[in-house]
Image (cartoon, rainbow, N blue to C red):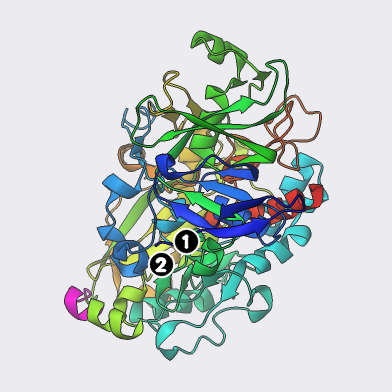
Amino acid sequence: MKLGALSLFFASGISIAYGKVYNSLSDLPNRQYDFIVVGGGTAGPVVASRLTENARFTVLLVEAGPDNEGVLAIQVPGLQNEIDYSKYDWGYNSIPQAAAGNRTIQMARGHVLGGSSSINGMVYTRGSADDYDQWAKLTGDSGWSWKSVFPYSKKNERWTPPPGGRNITGLYDPKVHGYEGNTRVSLRQTPAEPFDVKLFQTTKDLPEFPFSLDPNSGHALGLSWNQNAIGNGERSSAATAYLTTAVRARKNLDIVLNTQATRVLQTGSSRNTEIRTVELAPRSGGTTRKTFTASKEVILSAGAINSPQILMLSGIGDRKQLSALGIKTIVDLPSVGKDMPDHSVNFVSFFAANGTPAPPLDRAAALAEWTANRTGPLTEDFRMNTLWARIPDNATIWQNHTDPSSGKNAPHLELYFANTGDTAGAVIILVTPKSRGSVSLASTNPFDRPVIDLGYLTHPFDLEAIREGARILRRFFSGPAWADYIVGPTSPEPSSPEFDAAVKSTISTTFHYVGTTAMSKKGAKTGVVDPDLKVKGVKGLRVVDAGVIPFIPTAHTMAPTYIIAERAADLIKSAW
């Protein structure tokens, strides 16, 4: 979309043309910007959009991938499985996982404006209030507490009724939502189906499994209706929510696509620890490089994988690892790329009787309905509901392990129910893992993929917790609501060697990697950024993405990342 050149007049009287989306680095003029935001994923568009609300600030937003606009499979929630991952995904894989059958695991990362918010499952969950209070404790900054960040979660959100006029009274808590924000959030269009009725009847039959009115209240324990970043039948991504046509046309914002940041550089003398310069290259590769220097700050929002990669390529990281690759160390920060948790996922299933498989989707008819009025089956991706569960206090797992959760209001497990007609079950997502992975460099070539170790099942707690998840599911499906439906389990008994073997052969990722550029207290010898998200030991450089999360939230990480980006924008504004 051609937006044309507009003029921004500074107090100095100099007129410079801004306000355009450039499709390549070669098209981008040499200009001076106040802020350069590296990464147009989930966090970057928030920061760029909020900063350019101030007409005095000029911003360049750099995205390695192409534009999101005009891509039907990204726009339509029900066409997610048609997204061209060869174009809109970075194509990363983990290294072989020694504790998981020596398998490599595919790791989806959005390679498009909007980043992973443009290709993910759109689940919108904030996490437990205890999680954020733990962030505040770990950083020494009460501004990261639940009470402090809750207004930012509302600032991000624009609660939207589901399409089709479904009555959602009693299915969510209106008090905990925002109604004037950017990201549209809603419940699904489809009313309760027979499987849903049995799920929620179980919350009445079995006291262990309460009904949770709203998973975004900060107290999510129990079974709740899923909320998704979908509005008016369309995916609501960081790109659609924060880079609208009006925002893209702002006089003080430039966006360059298909452009990769290769390094951040010292500004001025090589002895200077001020880093406000970014080296850019065409995403297609080659030796072409251009540098741009921000007059105020560079903000890395390249994500939990790419932000640490850029830092290490720039000489900011573990001195020993950098020296081994011949990279001169600018700042010795051993925590860069380390201690990376992720939410792993497994599936446990049961034979179902009297179930009715869903009829095959008539894609042409469904797309015609969606095109005509944004209703119908394509307004949804999954129709599953979620049980947020804690492992019981009397479980034997606690004889050998301490509780890794942030508090008694935080779940250990997310159990995501699924029903195919002849099979019922749930995905077991471990949201409080003790295993940790890492991101490191394969070489000094910025176009080489980083070395990603998910570290799955390297801590014994994780496998034991997954077993507990399977036991919870057996108790859940033993309720009277399932007497005429569940015949028996198809998955092995949780205490059996066969169960462990099944977990190791099927464990995969939810793509919720965090912590690779983690926040810590000012002056701490561990961590990568201070609580204000400034990189330790340098000036002019911040990180704003999921990598800064110091304690993995019991949530899908999109909404927490929005919260971080909203607060970061205010921190940056207040500094200038």
Question: Mark 2 and mark 1: span between their CA atoms?
Answer: 63 Å
For image coordinates 69% across by 50% down, the residue present is 14
As for residue 482 lying within the magenta part, the answer is: no
Measured from the top left, where is residue 127 in percent x and y?
61, 58
Disc 2, SS = loop
Residue 411 visible somewhere in the drawing: no
Image position of 267 (left or right of 237): right
Is there CB contact under 8 Å for labels 2 and 1? Answer: no
Query: Which numbered marker is on residue 4?
Result: 1
Question: Which residues fall within the magenta stretch?
Answer: 357-366
- The residue mark sitting in front, 2 or 1, is 1
Image position of 329 (left or right of 539): left
Disc 1, SS = loop
Q: Main secondary structure of the magenta part?
A: loop
Query: Which numbered marker is on residue 478?
Result: 2
Measured from the top left, where is residue 487 in percent x and y?
27, 67
Q: Residues within 10 Å of mark 1 (few under 14, many from 20)?
A: few
